[in-house]
Image (cartoon, rainbow, N blue to C red):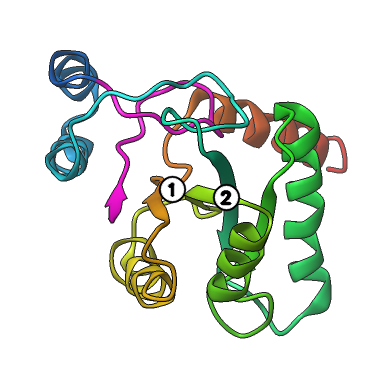
Amino acid sequence: RIEMLAMATRKALVPQVVSGRALARKVASAPARLRGQAAASVRVRRRVTTTRLQATSSNGDTLGVIIVDHGSKKKDSNEMLDAFADLYKRKTGRDLVEVAHMELCEPSIETALTKCYSRGARDIVVAPYFLSPGRHIKQDIPRIVRNAAKNYPDVNIEIAQPIGLDPLLAEVIESRVKAASEEL
């Protein structure tokens, strides 16, 4: 089973699903242009899940995380995802983390899924390393995951929302603006 998770947390890298009332409050406080996106994402899945970082899923199975980006022909760009995965592991304490590229290079989503499975994961969250919910998030990644998951009928896979709007991103951009302005 593959489902999209609604992002409703201030911690950029911890996707969660919230109850209908809590999400309704968040949607109501969102800018008008974003309300439709948030409402659409909640219709996909309504079950409440925990945001506590845990090595196992709610049913006790080992939880795997696949961080997926677009992929590039440039080696340096792809190595950045590896570096981010290492940072993610250190910050969260998660061990079963694999990287994948949606296209253009290896490891593919299917390869990462195979690695997670061989390491014991039966619950896997695919976390897109994308900012906004474009075609890749809405169509391509779910299709690729669905096709790869056919080989693993005993695995539960969730696809988290992209990074999206988060106050922490504003802080990151501001730090880059300050650094660049010092060069003027």
Q: Residues within 10 Å of mark 2 (few under 14, many from 20)?
A: many
Quarter-wise, where is residue 117 in the image?
Answer: bottom right
Q: Name the residue: 62% across, 51% down.
A: 120
95 over 98 or under it: above or below: above
Q: Quadrant of the C terminus?
A: top right
Left or right, residue 19 beside residue 6: left
Q: Name the residue: 86% across, 35% down.
A: 182
Image coordinates for residue 171, horizontal then vertical, percent: 63, 26
The residue where tag 1 is placed is: 162
Foreground pick, 62 / 145: 62
**SS majority, magenta:** loop
117 over 161 or under it: above or below: below
Mark 2 or mark 1, which has the lower sequence index?
Answer: 2
Secondary element type, mark 2 = strand
Q: Residues within 10 Å of mark 1 (few under 14, many from 20)?
A: many
81 over 146 or under it: above or below: above
Q: Name the residue: 66% across, 65% down.
A: 115
Tell me where the magenta segment starts and ends, as one range. Answer: 1-18
Left or right, residue 151 beside residue 98: left
Left or right, residue 47 beside residue 21: right
Residue 132 got which mark? none
Q: Name the residue: 69% across, 80% down.
A: 106
Image coordinates for residue 64, horizontal then vertical, percent: 58, 47
Foreground pick, 146 / 7: 146
The residue where tag 2 is placed is: 121
* Type of the residue with mark 2: Ala
Secondary element type, mark 1 = loop
* Type of the residue with mark 1: Pro
Image coordinates for residue 121, horizontal then vertical, percent: 57, 50
Image coordinates for residue 55, horizontal then vertical, percent: 62, 31
Q: Is residue 137 magenta?
A: no
